[in-house]
Image (cartoon, helix red, strand yellow):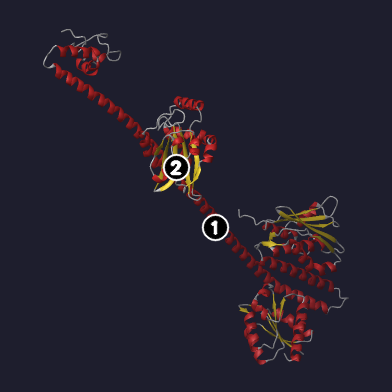
Amino acid sequence: MSRILVVDDEANIRLLYSEELAEEGYQVVTAASIAEAVEKLQGDVFDLTVLDIKLKNESGIDLLQRLVKERHDMPVILCSAFSCYKDDFSAWLADGYIVKSGDLTELKQEIARVLAKKAQRAKGGL
Amino acid sequence: MDWECCWDRDVVAMGDCPNIHEGDEDLLLSRRRRILEKCCDCANFKRDLNRFRESGHTLAPVFSLVHAEYQRQKTQIQSLVSFLDNKTLEVRFLHELGSVLQSSVDLEEVLSVALTAITAGKGFGMNRAFLMLSDRETNNLYGYLAIGPRNYEEANQTWDEISQNDMDLQTLAQSFRKNKLSSERDKFHDILEQLTLQLSDTNHILIKALDSKQPMLVEDAFHNPDVDYSFASLLGVDTFLLMPLISRNRRVGIIIADNCITHRRITEEDMRSIETFTFPVAFAIERASLYERLQVELSRVTEANIKLKEQQELIVKMEKMALVGRITSSVAHSIRNPLMVIGGFARSILKNTPLTDPKRDFIESIVGEAHQLEGVLDEILNYSDDLYPTKDFWDLNQLIETVLHELEERLAEQNCEISFYPAEHLPLAHIDYKQVSCCIRNIIISDIDGISGLHLEIRSSSDSEHIYLKLTNRERRFTNEELESMLTPFATSHDMGSGLGLALCRSMLEKQNIPFFVAAPPEGGIQYTLTLPIEKEELT
């Protein structure tokens, strides 16, 4: 069972993701801030992180850059209310980019795609 | 001795002296004045003097000597008075001329005064004058203006007119400028046209005069080795005066003056008088020319300032629009998160609600409305990203192809078809690609929304100024009220569709000066027309 870390400052969104992704068979852990996410990442192993970009006064891009350096084997999907960050070079470090929507189909498809790619990479020894 | 003259009488009567006439009554009673003013020049007195000399009186020769000296000095004084009168007139004239020349920075006024002064009877009284100016850019000396009659009839007519209207020099010059400047230029066009030569042609008499910086009286021009025969023929006179116009050592131009009608001899005195006049004329011409150039430069600077101001206003406007964009984006973001939660949980609930549950319809409504609101938010966020158009030249046919490619899936879902007829050799349109794409996409979505099996036709065409894009749907029917409603902001209508709305499209297009019309032809259907610019429009 793949473990997913969801980082979002909105409690309702964390709850929605937890419910929906758990239903898809994932084990979901949530964090409301970068500090909480870092803490959970240090004490646990995750297969993927779903990361919001605007986290109150923090930027998810900062955490993304840190994860790319320290946990390069763990893919990250950025999930934002803004589509404009797609054009931001820093956002290109992520493995996927989803604009938030009440319809989680696209997010679920993206998670499946990224995890499959990760598995394939591991299998290929890359 | 009986004297013929009345000098020995204290009082005389009218008729006693042949030199005393009406108006001289005072002299009848004043012997002293009568002797000095009349007797000394009187024939009777001279005869009396001869008789006195013949009388052998010892004082007689002395008397004759004194009388002769008196007459000589009187003549000399009269000549000096006449000379002084002339000089006074000349100084007055030069003063008048100087006042006008110093106060004017209008080139045409200066030239009118200069040429009028040369030819006016109250001025230097020459018959005709040509003004040639030097052009630094082409290094040419060229005929600019001429004044004077071309034949006797015209001369008589002009001089009659001038004598009937006693005008001072300034008035005469003003009248010339107002009534004759243009016609004189035309009148002498044939000669002026041929009066062009290189400033480097140092063999030409005009350039020689210019280089010498001294006036030159040219006589016997047709046989003068220094004068080009064709030049003399062009002027048609054998004597003329050349007056170089030099200002600050710069060759401003030259004036050619002659007496082609009266053939009055041009004297050294004429030349000296005119020489005094050429300095202020040259200075005034150069100053007026510089002023003209200054005006041109000033108008350029003013124009640049206006453009700068417009650009500043544009920047402020763009900043304001960017701020509006940021606010809109922020508001949309604040709405999106709760909307996503509502829509997400509604979907979640819907999944676990049995098909028979009566509340399922309500949940489906929440899911549907949340989905539609998310779509509107996407449009608003996209729109706020590009509130101010960024224009460039784009191929409209290619833009349409791209939009149609993006809509392929949706068109297929609704079983709709679009036929695109691109015009050949279509010029590039000066537009904001993203906004125009967004509008065309929304026009299509708005048109086909909720209806299956439609067929749209898109045609591009152009003329010398614009590109026209017509989207036609012959299958839909609209009333004028419905059309009006579609184009009114915030009006709600089922037929507006789920897109950005035609009102917003029109607003976006109008910001780019792209007129957008929707028409419902009487035969049915609906036609959308966009008129796109080819040229980059000037800032107004």
Dot 2 alpha-carbon crowd within 10 angstroms: few under 14, some 14 to 19, many 20 or more: many
Residue B80 lies, in percent from the top left, at 27, 28
* Mark 2, secondary structure of its residue: helix
Residue B200 lies, in percent from the top left, at 46, 49
Q: What chain does badge 2 belong to? A: B
Q: Residue furthest left?
A: B58
Given the image, on which type of amino acid does mark 1 rest?
A: Leu
Q: Is residue B171 left or right of residue B22?
A: right
Determine which quarter of the picture holds residue A31.
bottom right
* Mark 1, secondary structure of its residue: helix
Compared with B356, B45 (above or below) is: above
Which of the pair A8/B12 is nearer the observer? B12
Q: What chain does badge 1 belong to? A: B
The quadrant of the picture occupied by the N terminus of chain B is top left
Q: How far apart are the two marked residues, 1 and 2, measured between alpha carbons?
A: 48 Å
Q: Is residue B318 left or right of residue B265?
A: right
Determine which quarter of the picture holds residue B487.
bottom right
Residue to which mark 2 is pinned: B206
Q: Is residue B148 visible?
A: yes
Dot 1 alpha-carbon crowd within 10 angstroms: few under 14, some 14 to 19, many 20 or more: few
Residue B395 lies, in percent from the top left, at 72, 62
Compared with B7, B431 (above or below) is: below
Are marks 1 and 2 in one subunit? yes
| Mark carried by residue A4 | none
Residue B420 lies, in percent from the top left, at 81, 61
Given the image, on which type of amino acid does mark 2 rest?
A: Leu
The residue sitting at 81% across, 68% down in the picture is: B408
Residue to which mark 1 is pinned: B308
Which of the pair B14/B316 is nearer the observer? B14
Q: Earlier in the sequence, mark 1 or mark 2?
A: 2
Asked whether disc 1 touches disc 2, contact meaning CB atoms under 8 Å apart, the reply is: no
